[in-house]
Image (tube, rainbow, N blue to C red):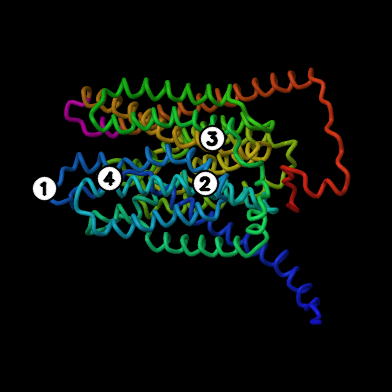
Amino acid sequence: MAVPPVPQARTAVPVRAVRVPLLVDVVIGLLTLVALPLALVAIPNTISVVAALLPPDVSQVDMIRVHGLALPAMLVTVPLAAVAVRRLRAAPILVAGLTLLALADVAGGYSETVTLVGVLRVLHGIGAGMLVPATLVAVAERPRRRVLLGIWAGALAASLLSAQALALWAIRDVTSWQVTLQPYPLLTGVALALAAVYLVLWMISRDGEKQAEGEILPGGRPTSAERGRLALAIVPAAAIAVLGVGITFDWPPPLVVVAAALAVVGMLALAAFGTFEGPGGRTLAFVNVAVGLVVLPTAAQMTYIELGGPLGGPGLRGLWVPFLVAALVALAAAVLAGRVPETFATRMAAVGLAAVVAGLAAIRLLVPAPTGTPLVVPFVLLAAGAAVALVGAFQTAGLGSAMLGLSLCFPAVLAGFLLGTGIQVNRLREAAAAAQGNGNALVDGFIDALHMWALIGGFVVVGVIVLSAVLARRAAAAADGQVVIPAPTPSPEEGDDIPGDTGPGR
């Protein structure tokens, strides 16, 4: 009778239980740092910058219209992908999303018609919408989730801040307009390779075995109630998507501003009265709406103002230092915030949003700037504040609440763009009427529009802080009046198979 190879089996266990999980965490961290900027850089509509390179028979208006389809497609995809990633796990969704981006990048070099450009931009939006929730769930599945969550939140905040600049950087000095459809193909390939490695490691590690055995995910599989809440989140997303497309058909700016403002009120109402698991679910939803509403739309306006030309500014070459400093500070602040005890998580969310308000105030004081150095202040406050707020809110929220909150972030991004654009158009019309041939009046109009938007955004974020605090206190007061009956303690044998156990050993 053959003797089983006991020594070999024993040496194989620690290799798989220690080294492979550590390698998986490293791959997830690198993948997050690459995939989130790729997802966010798909948002800006930059075709107008290279409109002079379009063929004479191609309508510039139609091309700008279809090029803007990525963000509406993305914000509708996020809640759908949130359900899919909870059922299928993160690894296959990440590979699928990056494959879509890679295919769209490859096909972008051969696009010639408006219809094909529209299809590719929708694919960009769908792929990007799959990456954001998938990276979050990949982080939540890991035992070292606190460190990885800091990396995820810092990368998301830095990507929101720099998405417009990254999109413009890719098309500087280009000779072909198709570059707007494939801004960073090499980076997409690197991300796809990392996702493939993650998929293989996930399949050969204990994670793959756990799924095969039907083990429950962190936070459990999505319930029918959670799917209903995510479906409800599609309503404001679809409404904002329709507005985003409609504004390209010359809808009146006041109508767009009013409709976008109502959509923001609807998202805040959903955040206030939605059903969340975990004490921080409501706070998380508020933070996502506030961060999405102000960070990317404000940074995009600042980037255009500081590009040089008639508005002055240091240009893209002078902006890379402030963006880099802001990204590094945001990552460091988020990782440090992830190590703070959860008892201070709600305070961290409020402190982070307060830093965002300070960044908006700094814009009114420091923008425009002739050099990039003063811009370090608002950039760091916006990125680091958003990162800390996200980490603080995510720490106390269940995974289902995290998916719902994330589903509100990108509709808020588009709402911020619509509100900022509406304010800018109205201000420029007033400046043009009063200019009477004075070009400086139009320049002042751009700057005044940014300052006005920063002021409005600051008041909205302050309102979110106050509303979140008031509702949190009411919830705490209501909880104090309830009698909680503790669940029976299972025996040691039963504790090995507790449904829903999501401790680090699971």
Residue drawn at x 87%, y 38% is 489
Q: Earlier in the sequence, mark 3 or mark 1?
A: 1
Type of amino acid under label 3:
Asn
- Left or right of 414 in this view: 228: right
* Residue 73 image position (x, y, % from top left): 38, 40
Density class for disc 1 (Cα within 10 Å; few <14, some 14-19, many ≥20) is few
In this rendering, which labeled residue sits more in front, label 2 or label 4?
4
| Residue 87, image quadrant | top right
Kind of residue at disc 4: Gly
Total numbered labels placed on residues in the image: 4
Residue 375 forms part of the magenta stretch: no
Magenta segment: 435-444
Query: Residue drawn 79% across and 17% down?
Result: 481
As measured in the structure, the alpha-carbon distance from the residue carrying label 3 to the one carrying label 1 is 42 Å
**Residue bearing mark 1:** 57
Q: Nearer the viewer, mark 1 or mark 4?
A: 4
Q: Earlier in the sequence, mark 2 or mark 4?
A: 4
Tell me the SS state at disc 3: helix
Q: Earlier in the sequence, mark 3 or mark 2?
A: 2
